[in-house]
Image (tube, grey):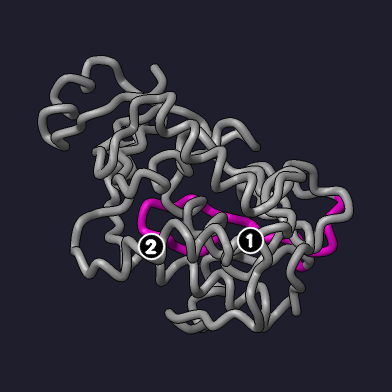
Amino acid sequence: MSITQALLGPLVAAGSPKPLITHYDDATGARVELSRATAANWAAKTANWLVDELDLEPGAPVSVALPAHWQTLGVLLGAWWCGAHVVAEPAGAEVAFAPATALESGAGAHVVAAVGLDPMGGPVRGLPAEVVDYATDIRVHGDDFAPRGPVPGSAPALCGSSVDEVLGRAAERAAALGVEPGARVLSALEWTLPGGVLDGLLSVLSARGSLVQVSNPDPAKAERRRADERTTVELGG
């Protein structure tokens, strides 16, 4: 079973309309909220694109050099759903997901996918011919994903760690960070690989919680945000 099936599957199956991620960018004032089902749709579209367009095989390396963002959530969960091995370095990767403003971070991969990180998931204009636009390309793919086969627990999933190791580590980090079952987590942690993703994302999903992720945090807004979002745990500064 893949990381996505293990962590996102039960949340979607519960049928709750609760948000999975609420993303703020205090530099722009943007606020975007994705329900569990909508997050699963983005992940499914990503997984379908990786398999249908790139013929990605389980265990194939996929580089992710993106900040903590709701679109990054779709990228990571989609990659894991089809059994990809998420890595930090693009050299030799089948595909590298890179910010549209830093395409060089994908150099060395067979395919570079630009992620615009637009608040509403809009396309990126004016890209080089050899770079694909993530948001545009995945839109035509289905909202459901059926893996070609099971993802073994021993398969590489995150920077050399297996699926089983990542799931175990996520549960350990949730306990260590005080992320209790169903927690509403306020976080400013970046999703660096592997530690930032484990602490800032996977620990929350492991506890079946929801995430309020803040980019470019403004300290003056923190107290009001805690009250508005009814957060119960805080990670990062």
Using the image as rendered, state which of residue 175 and residue 195 is in the foreground: 175
Gap between marks 1 and 2 measured at Cα:
27 Å
Q: Residue at x 42, y 51 (%)?
A: 70
The residue under label 1 is 126
Q: Residue at x 67, y 78 (%)?
A: 51
- Give the label, 1 or 2, closer to the camera: 2
Residue 212 percent location from the top left of the image: 30, 39
**Residue 39: assigned label:** 2
State which quadrant residue 66 falls in: top right
Quarter of the image with the C terminus is top left
Q: Is residue 89 above or below residue 61?
A: above
Q: Residues within 10 Å of mark 1 (few under 14, many from 20)?
A: few
Q: Residue at x 54, y 83 (%)?
A: 146
Mark 2 falls on what kind of element?
helix
Kind of residue sitting beneath label 2: Ala
Residue 172 percent location from the top left of the image: 49, 33
Kind of residue sitting beneath label 1: Gly
* Dominant SS in magenta: loop
Q: Residue at x 33, y 49 (%)?
A: 208
Query: Upstream in the sequence, badge 1 or badge 2?
Result: 2
Q: Which residues are magenta?
A: 108-129
Residue 209 percent location from the top left of the image: 30, 45
